Amino acid sequence: MKKFTVLLVLSISILFIACPTKTTVQTAKQLDITKPDGLYREGQNYLKQKNYDFALRDFTTLIEDFSEDTLADDAQFMIAEILSNPKNPNVDLQSAVDEYQNLIDNYPDSQYIDKANKKIEQLEKKLDGSK
């Protein structure tokens, strides 16, 4: 009887751990990556998981497919931020500078212009110091 009780408890525990909650299922359904907001949110989710490559993929796709969308400048900024993030194993400061400059060139009315200019200045100092 004791073995049966232990097995029953383990089975129920595994069931609760392995099954997605209603909230998880609803969240997955709400992310439509054929639309800009779905791509952006998925990219943000990947960032939270520190999956920089997949986040870059989603933000890049958003810009390529929806360059006129209101989230495009946000995605452009996020690309530059990911490339300049020291926690990213594929950090690339020169590419980050280029992406910040793309933001300035392609989205001159963006709320991120001032931040992008400051980041370019900081990164160029780092790049000059490493030569």
Image (spheres, rainbow, N blue to C red):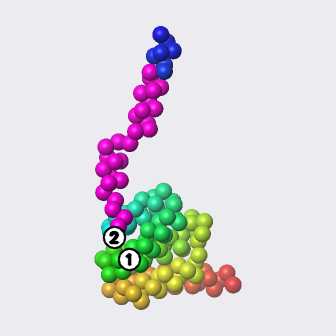
What's the residue at 42%, 32% (across, down)? Answer: 15
Helix, strand, or loop for circle 1? helix
In this rendering, position of residue 30 left or right of residue 114: left
Residue 15 visible somewhere in the drawing: yes
Mark 2 nearby-residue class (10 Å; few <14, some 14–19, many ≥20) = many
Residue 118 visible somewhere in the drawing: no
Please check the rendered image and state whether residue 10 is part of the magenta-colored stretch, yes or no. yes
Q: Nearer the viewer, residue 37 or 65?
A: 65
Q: Position of residue 42 (x, y in %)?
A: 40, 62
Q: Amino acid at mark 1?
A: Asp
Please check the rendered image and state whether residue 19 is part of the magenta-colored stretch, yes or no. yes
Q: Nearer the viewer, residue 91 or 61?
A: 61
User: Mostly what secondary structure, the magenta segment?
Assistant: helix
The image shows a total of numbered marks equal to 2
Q: Amino acid at mark 2?
A: Pro
What's the residue at 56%, 66% (across, down)? Answer: 88
Q: Are marks 2 and 1 in contact (CB under 8 Å)?
A: yes
Residue interval drawn in magenta: 8-34
Q: Quadrant of residue 112?
A: bottom left
Which of the two discs, 2 and 1, sits closer to the camera? 1
Q: Position of residue 117 (x, y in %)?
A: 45, 85
In this rendering, position of residue 30 left or right of residue 18: left
Tell me the residue that label 2 is attached to: 36
Tell me the residue that label 1 is attached to: 65
The residue lying furthest to the right in this view is: 131
